[in-house]
Image (spheres, rainbow, N blue to C red):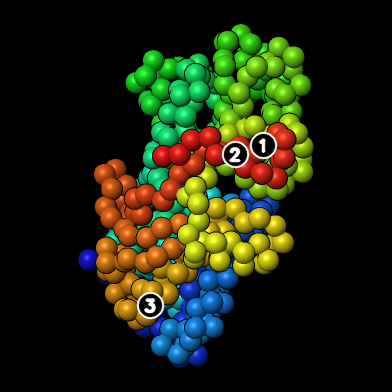
Amino acid sequence: MNTPPSPPAAGRTDGSSVRIGALAPLTRPGWVEAGHHLLAGLELAVHEVNDAGGISGRPVELVVRDTAADPQQAAAAVDELARMGVAALAGEYHSVVARAAAARADAIGLPFLCSSAVLDGLTDQPTEWVARLAPAQSHGWQIYADFLLGAGHNRIAVAAQPSVYWASGTRILRDRLAARGGTVIELDMGELDPAAVCDRLVENRATALLVLAGHPEPAVSIVKSVRHDTRLAGILIGAPAGQPEFTEWAKLLGDDGTAIPFLRYLPERLGPLGARVETALRERLGEAPSFVAFEGYDTVTVLADVLRSHGADRARIAESWPRVAVEGTRGQIRFSRTPGIGVWQWAWTPVQVVDRDPAAPDRFRILHTG
């Protein structure tokens, strides 16, 4: 492995703690609720590691930086955390932000275990420094496309904002659906308002609309407009990126936010570790934990195992990715090289398509698994 030059303090602390840098969107325009769930999982795992004696008697210290969904802010935070001597970097939810963080971590030789971002192209070139827990977008969104086809939908509209992430998702859906006789109709949310989206859906005879747009806006306004347009009473609304996972969605949309299938990364039934962590996360958050909270917990669990086995030297941490075998909340975590993906990848975490039950919006229905 080519090791970039690093400052003398790289991977070491003053001896009082082992530092892990953490990135999360904690202020707008970031998806703040996702950031809080991610951080809750990270913090819970750190608390448990320290209760169990830390890393060779040294406590783990989580050094948190807010990315606010800003790639430049994230890259600057990576540099700052590296100067502080963190052994590794964890977290981040937004794919475009995680991509900037991964590029910087790769450039300076800082191990980065990405918790939640799914963009296939997390790095431009293969790297030894970055590993990822979340499934690649191509894997999860192909499963979502299979769900749509299985439910009888082959004429799909996507209301998409301009973004590398949304464009990648649209391409994955189009390729998967086209191979099975389906069609994707693109509606550019850079040009259309929600009312115009409804008109386009009618004109194109779409049977399903996928909301590939930011939360809360314009996603919430799109859903409200479609739900209250009598011409579209039978249309399926979907949100593969997972907007309906969080309670803010239910608060803003009420009954309009139910029966909207989305992707989440949980098994059908949690094992003993997952069930115990779910209880602890619920207590910490004051609500049901999302899959993002489990991703945060698993991230620190993996890093703690690596630190115990290989110490806090950055190069040794990065070299350890292919030897990881850690029991996480959602199954055993191992990293491998996956075609078309430049980072070490857990292939694969469980994938579900779920929605909020109209009869009980706080309950999720599992519609499809992959």
Measured as percent of width and height from the top left, residue 103 is found at 40, 56
Question: Nearest the camera: 89 or 58?
Answer: 58
Circle 3: residue type: Leu
Instruction: Report the residue at 62% width, 32% height from top.
Output: 260
Going from the N terminus, do you reach mark 3 or mark 2 first? 3
Measured as percent of width and height from the top left, residue 117 is found at 48, 50
Instruction: Report the residue at 34% width, 21% height from top.
Output: 179
- Tags 1 and 2 in contact by the CB under 8 Å rule? yes
**In front: label 3 or label 2:** 2
Image quadrant in which you'd find residue 15: bottom left
**Crowd band around label 1 with a 10 angstrom C-alpha radius: few (<14), some (14–19), many (20+):** some
Going from the N terminus, do you reach mark 1 or mark 2 first? 1
Circle 1: residue type: Asp
Work out whether 207 lies above or below 100: above
Which residue lies under the disc numbered 3? Answer: 307
Work out whether 49 lies above or below 368: below
Q: Left of 52 or right of it: where is 31?
A: right
Question: Nearest the camera: 43 or 166?
Answer: 43
Measured as percent of width and height from the top left, residue 362 is found at 70, 45
Using the image, tell me which numbered label, if any, was put on residue 125. none
Q: CA distance from mark 3 to mark 1?
A: 42 Å
* The residue positioned farthest toward the left in the image shown: 1
Q: CA distance from mark 1 to mark 2?
A: 6 Å
**Crowd band around label 2 with a 10 angstrom C-alpha radius: few (<14), some (14–19), many (20+):** some
Which residue lies under the disc numbered 1? Answer: 357
Q: Quarter of the image for the N terminus: give it.
A: bottom left
Which residue lies under the disc numbered 2? Answer: 365
Going from the N terminus, do you reach mark 3 or mark 1 first? 3
**In front: label 3 or label 1:** 1
